[in-house]
Image (tube, rainbow, N blue to C red):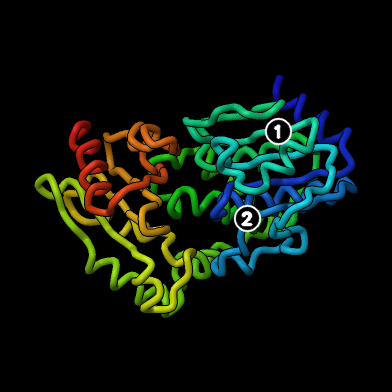
Amino acid sequence: MIEKRIIDAINNAKSIAILPHVSVDGDGLGSSVALALALEKMGKDITVYIEEEIPATYEFLPGKDYVEVYKSNPKKHDLVLALDTGDLARLGKRIEIFDNTDLTINIDHHTTNTEFASLNLVKTTAAAVGELIYQLIKMLGISFDESIATCLYVAISTDTGGFRYSNTTPITHQITADLIDNGADVSKISQLVFETMSLKKLRLMGLAIDSIEIFDDGRVAFITVTNEMLKKVGAAEEDCDGLVNVARNINGVEVAVLIRQRTDNEYKINFRSQNYVDVSAIANKYSGGGHKKAAGCTVRGIMEEVKEMINKDIREVL
């Protein structure tokens, strides 16, 4: 049983590194910090390495003392756990830590996961990696407290869109009920994560709404965010999070696309679908990945040509 092998590996390790994916989100960060808090109770030496600074939305999370922005010169660890990471490319510079460790664990729920570690726990039926970490902490026999419960509630609630997405299951609600019993403050977390944004992000959202283009009789919506737009309102990269859902929420839209300019000829593409389109299959064409209804990739080219290419891919599956 893979879970038992993972538990044995954790029990035998002294120094453990935890690596969520680049551009860390609520599930990746919340799961990582929750696991760090739990393993600290076992007396482990824990570091959560991330690629960028903690997004402002999640600065309230307990356990930030375990988080370090990785620079270079990896420290030697007994064990590395990659969380919510579909493939090695999603580790960024921190692949040095992964490659410098003999025993590695991959815990994920993406259908496109490449099972790149020594031990791979990939359950695509899980709504969030937070669910898998909850179960792992239970199996380790570690008691939950308010801090762990808060981090896991953030992980699960963000990856389910506040429990509105179709990946939400009865198990999801059973787990979150236990997290609430252990101190997760639903009202406070919901306000901080879902109901609060900076003025800069609000202004960026206004520009993004102005950029919306509708195709295929209203079934496809594109949002474009350029570097110039971010500069105009003083927004940061993290302020782009969630903008694709503005297009997804338009009545009649089946597929929403956010095109985020990175350089003059490189674009990060985020896909969302409502019902039947598997956007992970489209992302896979460009070495990306994700879930059936939420996926992403990076594409090079000229903006208008990239739009037409992506739109053609979507049109083929509509």
Height in image: 237 above or below 4? below
- Residue 140 falls in image quadrant: top right
Dot 1 falls on a residue whose secondary structure is strand
Height in image: 29 above or below 104? below
Query: Which amino acid, mark 2?
Result: Glu
Residues packed near mark 2 inside 10 Å, few (<14), some (14 to 19) or many (20 plus): many
Name the residue at 9% across, 47% down.
Answer: 217
Dot 2 falls on a residue whose secondary structure is loop
User: Horizontally, is 93 left or right of 23 in the view?
Assistant: right
Residue hosting label 2: 51
Percent of width and height locating residue 243: 36, 61
The mark that comes first in sequence, 2 or 1, is 2
- Residue 101 falls in image quadrant: top right
Which part of the image, by quadrant, shows the N terminus?
top right
Between 137 and 66, the residue placed more toward the observer is: 66
> Nearer the observer, disc 2 or disc 1?
2
Name the residue at 16% across, 54% down.
Answer: 214
Percent of width and height locating residue 181: 65, 54
Name the residue at 45% across, 55% down.
Answer: 162
Q: On residue 105, which mark appears?
A: 1
Residues packed near mark 1 inside 10 Å, few (<14), some (14 to 19) or many (20 plus): many
Query: Which amino acid, mark 1?
Result: Ile
Label 2, label 1: how far apart the Cα atoms are:
19 Å
Name the residue at 43% across, 40% down.
Answer: 167
Percent of width and height locating residue 164: 39, 50
